[in-house]
Amino acid sequence: MAAAMELRCWGADWGLPSVHTDSLVVLAYSRFSGAKLTVSHIDWTWKTLTANSPELLCGDSVVQEPAQILSFMRKQRFNADYELTARQGADTMAYIALLEEKLRPALLHTFWVDAENYTSLTRPWFASRSPFPLNFIVPSRLASIALSRILLTKGEAPLHRISEIEGKIYSDAKECLNLLSYRLGTANHFFGNSPTSLDAFVFGFVAPLHKASLPSSHLQSHLKQLENLTHFCDNILEVYFSSDHPCPPPPPPPAVQESMDANLQKLTQLVNKESNLIEKMDDNLRSSPQHKPHRLDPKPSLSSANSSSPA
């Protein structure tokens, strides 16, 4: 029996199961793959300062970071990507890298560096979810981490101010959203009829930008013009996270049943080939001219030879 899995993450708000991007990615993937998670919110606990969110606990294993958590779930046979082709798998990795490089810096800047958004929305929310005296420490600590991460990924020496790359950050983010919108088109999911890990990542990155009540965000205004992306987020929330709509059953695991079906299909093809070959041989025999079988005259035995010889 598989060990129970517990996910520690930031809590829900803004109509989302979590306001935290990486936590949303894991929560969405767990719904897509049918993984049973016990969700423990770190809100109002000392883990707001010490824990890395999201964090998955399963038996003696502790897994952090969305990519590592999703990989761990796949090893537990909760795989939402098993129908993807090799080309689609490569595209998934490319788009996830695009999200990390182009969109994440803009999200960090929007929520943690933009003074108006930070003062009016982000800081009050995280302060209200942290116990005293962490409510004075956690928001500023997270803001400092966000700023350092932006400068680390987008900054080029010599660089001393975030304003020097602010325009480039948002230009890249808008380009990324445009590419995602074009790739999605009119479909509900990026690949086929079922959501995959790419859908989970896009949902985790785009949904907070879509749902948060930001007093200042040109990026959110740009997103609202891409109606297929906002509909994509709303559809996932309604189908997989709405209490009025139970989650659809997850796709069947590809483990034993698929191998049995594949072997049965190969066996059926082999039997059909053998049957066709036998029919052709039978037809050839029937259509070939029939000749009386030629029998060799038996050699005379030694005793009969002796009896016929003269005395």
Image (spheres, helix red, strand yellow):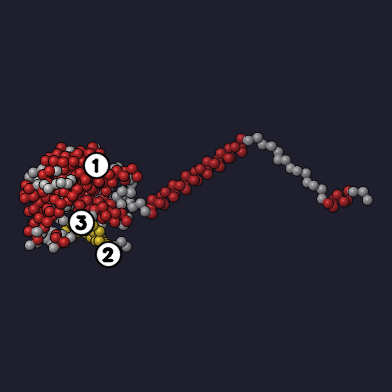
Identify the image quadrant of the N terminus.
bottom left
Q: Earlier in the sequence, mark 3 or mark 1?
A: 3
Counting other residues with Cα less than 10 Å from the Cα at mark 2, is it few (<14), some (14-19), or many (20 or more)? few
* Residue 140 placement (x, y as % from top left): 9, 55
* Residue 304 placement (x, y as % from top left): 85, 50
CA distance separating discs 2 and 3: 17 Å
Q: Is residue 175 above or below residue 10?
A: above
Do the CB atoms of the residues marked 3 and 1 lie less than 8 Å apart?
no
Most extreme residue toward the right is: 311
Q: Which mark is residue 136?
A: none
Left or right: residue 124 compared with residue 184? left
Q: Which mark is residue 60?
A: 2
The amino acid at mark 3 is: Pro
Q: Nearer the viewer, residue 165 or 268?
A: 165
CA distance separating discs 1 and 2: 37 Å
Q: Earlier in the sequence, mark 1 or mark 2?
A: 2
Which residue is at a point 12% across and 43% down the rendered structure image?
164
* Residue 234 placement (x, y as % from top left): 18, 44
The amino acid at mark 1 is: Asn
Residue for badge 1: 188
Q: Secondary structure at mark 2?
A: loop
Of tags 3 and 1, which is closer to the observer?
3
Which residue is at a point 22% across and 39% down the rendered structure image?
179
CA distance separating discs 3 and 1: 26 Å
Residue 12 location, quadrant: bottom left
Which residue is at a point 16% across and 43% down the rendered structure image?
169
Q: Earlier in the sequence, mark 2 or mark 3?
A: 3
Which residue is at a point 10% across and 51% down the rendered structure image?
122
Residue for badge 3: 54
Q: Is residue 295 above or below residue 149?
A: above
Do the CB atoms of the residues marked 1 and 2 lie less than 8 Å apart?
no
Q: Nearer the viewer, residue 305 or 152?
A: 152
